[in-house]
Image (cartoon, grey):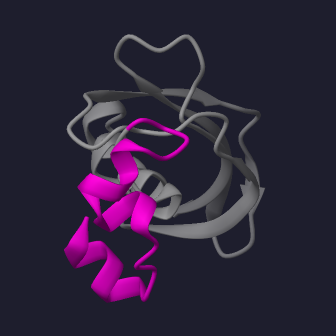
Amino acid sequence: MNTFADATGDHQWIHTDPEKAKDGPFGGPIAHGYLTLSLIIPLFGELLDITGISMSVNYGLDKVRFPSPVPVGARIRLHGAVGTVEEAQGNGVQMPLTFTVEVEGSDKPACVAQAVYHHYA
């Protein structure tokens, strides 16, 4: 948490002060929402193998929400749903995805993100 806090400048106590966070609204320290969002990148590589392309570009995000926190040390997993793939400029395709980051033992997702990728042959 501290390394991410240093990289982003977000040193809010709910992330970096375990003692104070115990008495906070989440009962302990939680991961930064943007840290959770950034973990989609390595988890996505384990979720889907796209072949026959030379390059992928993260085109952006349409919507991101953090419905529930990720307690420090919690296990997470990623679900992904591919939307309608369309042609993109420059001999490529545009692929929308909806990602859901789940926390083990929680009924609510930690992050739901609608992303758009461009893949090129």
Residue 51 visible in rendering: no
Residue at point 67% right, 35% down? 67
Residue 67 belongs to the span the image colors magenta: no
* Image spot of residue 70 (x, y percent): 41, 39
Nearer-the-camera pick, 84 or 2? 2
> Is 28 located above or below residue 75 in the figure?
below
* Residue 88, horizontal then vertical, whole percent: 73, 63
Q: Position of residue 51 (x, y in %)?
A: 33, 44
Q: Is residue 25 magenta?
A: yes
Residue 63 is at least partly visible in this image:
yes
Q: Nearer the viewer, residue 70 or 57?
A: 70
Where 27 falls versus 96 (above or below)? above
Instruction: Determine the residue positioned at 35% across, 52% down.
Output: 39
Q: Which residue is located at x 47 percent, y 15 percent?
A: 106
Left or right of 42 in this view: 106: right
Seen at 49% across and 54% down, the residue is 37
Image coords of residue 101 (percent x, y)? 48, 33
Seen in the picture, residue 35 relative to 98 is either above or below; the reply is below
Q: Nearer the viewer, residue 39 or 11?
A: 11
Left-right relation of 32 to 77: right
The magenta stretch is 1-27
